[in-house]
Amino acid sequence: MKMGVKSANALRLTVSYIILIAIAVCCLYPAIWVLVSSLRPGTSLFSPTFFPEKFTFVHYKELFTNNRFQYGTWYLNTLKIATLSMIFSTILTTLSMYALSRFRFRGRKSTLTVMLVLGMFPGFMSMIAVFIVLLQLNLLDTHAALILVYSAGSVLGGFIVKGFYDTIPRSLDEAARMDGATHLQVFVKIMLPLSKPMLTYVALTTFTGAWVDFIFARLVLRSKENWTLAVGMWDLVNTSQNSNFTLFAAGAVLIAIPITLLFVFLQRFLVQGLTSGASKG
Amino acid sequence: MNRHRGIAGILSFLFMGLGQLYNRQFIKGLIFIVVEAAALFYFIPNLGKAFWGVITLGEKTQGFQKVGKVMVRVEGDHSIYLLISGLITLLVFAVFLIFYIMNIRDAYVTGKLRDNGGQPAAFKQSWAHLTDKNFPYLMLSLPALGVLFFTIMPIIFMIMLAFTNYASPNHIPPKSLVDWVGFETFTNLLTLKTWSATFFGVLSWTVIWAVIATVTTYFGGMLVALLVESKGVRFKKMWRTIFILPYAIPQLISLLVMRNLFNGQFGPINQYLSYFGLGKLPWLTDPLWAKVTVIIVNMWVGIPVSMVLIMGILTAIPKDLYEAADVDGATGFQKFKIITLPFILFSTAPILITQFAGNINNFNVIFLLTNGDPVNGDYQYAGSTDLLVTWLYKLTLNNSQFNMSAAIGIIIFIIIASISIFSYRRTKSFKEEDMIQ
């Protein structure tokens, strides 16, 4: 009897491990494949073997030296846009969601409802109108336009942040208020240190959002030297997918690496953010 | 005794800030006067034009006029610019009106305070009041302005477009004018055969896609989470990190890579199939296979998120429930069926519905992987795997059917809104039932 349970258990574990390994292979395969492809000599998508006979960094070099791409410039552009949008949207989102979570003021309920309703429209329904507004403000083909739009739009996704502040006990700020702190002081001295996981979550998601957006960026940025990585990548894929696959692979690896590393290292915060937002529904 | 409140109120009604000056709040009064002066300066030339523009959408068509002996092109009205700038002016006017009413109220309240023998607040005090009692308004005003002009205004604009004939080839400014047509766009979409066939085709695929995509990622995620967390499995942290990887890679990259992986001619997937002696599959080029492919790839992208969520819930299940079940001699499967599954389902029901709504609008997977293709000859500007959103995108950016795409946007909104209301009701009933916690 005891042996039966034991061997049944061993069988169960073996099956579990086999499934886990199979899933892990599925998860890792595309990533490893594109990494290997980026190091393969030649340009074609087709390759007789998974690992090439020899590895080469020539595609990475080409990205930065071929003047058909301005990969270096795009990288700097993207870094600038993503960082600035991240800073602005994090500040805007945390401050406004803090206000919505902590204060009971007239119009609070309707603000929350309006936020919910606005979130239900497909995002790029507004694209054309925003485009015309930017045209009239003379902001087309500038990075400021992208930063402005990304930051202005980020507030609507702030429900997770509000849910997070809802969970921090009120007695904390009430005590500080008793001691004569202003609202801003309470926020900076007490709330900010507590909201580190949330700040990381918001900063990370807005940074990635700006890093990979190609829909809006493609619409706004017209001249090649102003492009972001995502736009450049999209262009590369559309113009020469099969003829220059290895180059695409190299570009893809360079775009994905910073984001992937950030995600993996900040996993803990992400998981906290996802689950705390979820339990609030 | 109520002289002051009346006079101050009326003065502020006549011109912003006068009531404040009357109440001896000089700095505040001056600021308000400057605001009104600026407003008058802006609204006098613009407001009438804004109303005219929004109502008529322009009256003069672009044309040629004989000046002397040569024909000269005369610029006509640009209906779309008129509509947008009119909308912006009207919105600014609304913000101004709110401010104006607040100004009257402020003068009245301060006057009342003086009637009752109080002192009107000095500027310093008013400022302190603003940062203290009105702190939330102060914090929200900047984001609210951003949302007003970059989200609300565009949405109103698009809703209005659905009721115009703004579409290629006959009504594209500046060449020609755009007009209000009422519900014609919607009737065309639903009754005109070319449009309605596409609409109902795309709509039904959107619903099928959303159901399958949600169910597969949800139960896939649950399976993976249960496997990793099950008793006896080691290196839990390593497994979790590996499985989270698809979520960590930006979708833009992973989906474009997938597009190459599934390439029918040269892609490695087909290469492996032929290696095992199987034929090549038309992953992205056959209508049915393309649908299968997007669902498979979506599982790869979506399972990690569900996995993370469900892992979080698994740790929240009280251990004593399992202990009690052990005492009663329940088998592993019974424990899963009676404790784990109901617990997960109850706490994730709202997320399930949000994910369903999200999948209806899942632009990235379709657009980056298949771009809506393969082309469907029976459809108007749409391919076999197009969802409503990607169709909307194509109609706007590639085919200039702005009114149609706006109408579709409104329909998507109605679908999502009804799902959300339903979900909200349900979560409320869950909370009232007190099934958990």
Image (spheres, coloured by chain):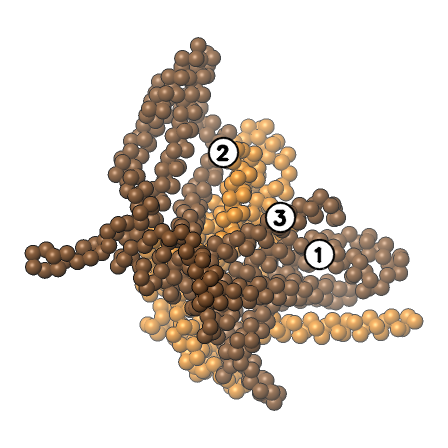
Chain colours: A orange, B brown
**Residue found 44% across the figure and 67% down from its top:** B194
Label 3 packing within 10 angstroms: few (<14), some (14-19), many (20+): some
Instruction: Name the mark nearer the viewer: 3 or 1.
Output: 3
User: Outermost residue, right direction?
Assistant: A1
Cβ atoms under marks 2 and 1 closer than 8 Å = no
Label 2 packing within 10 angstroms: few (<14), some (14-19), many (20+): some
Residue topped by disc 1 = B345
* First along the sequence among labels 2 and 1: 2
Chain at tag 2: B
Q: Is residue A110 above or below residue B7?
A: below
Q: CA distance from mark 2 to mark 3?
A: 30 Å
Q: CA distance from mark 2 to mark 1?
A: 40 Å
Q: Is residue A70 above or below residue B283?
A: above
Percent across and percent down for residue B170 are 31, 62
Left or right: A40 with respect to B273? left
Q: Is residue B233 above or below residue B62?
A: below
Residue topped by disc 2 = B135
Left or right: B130 with respect to A195? left
Whether labels 2 and 1 share one chain: yes
* First along the sequence among labels 3 and 1: 1
**Residue found 42% across the figure and 57% down from its top:** B185
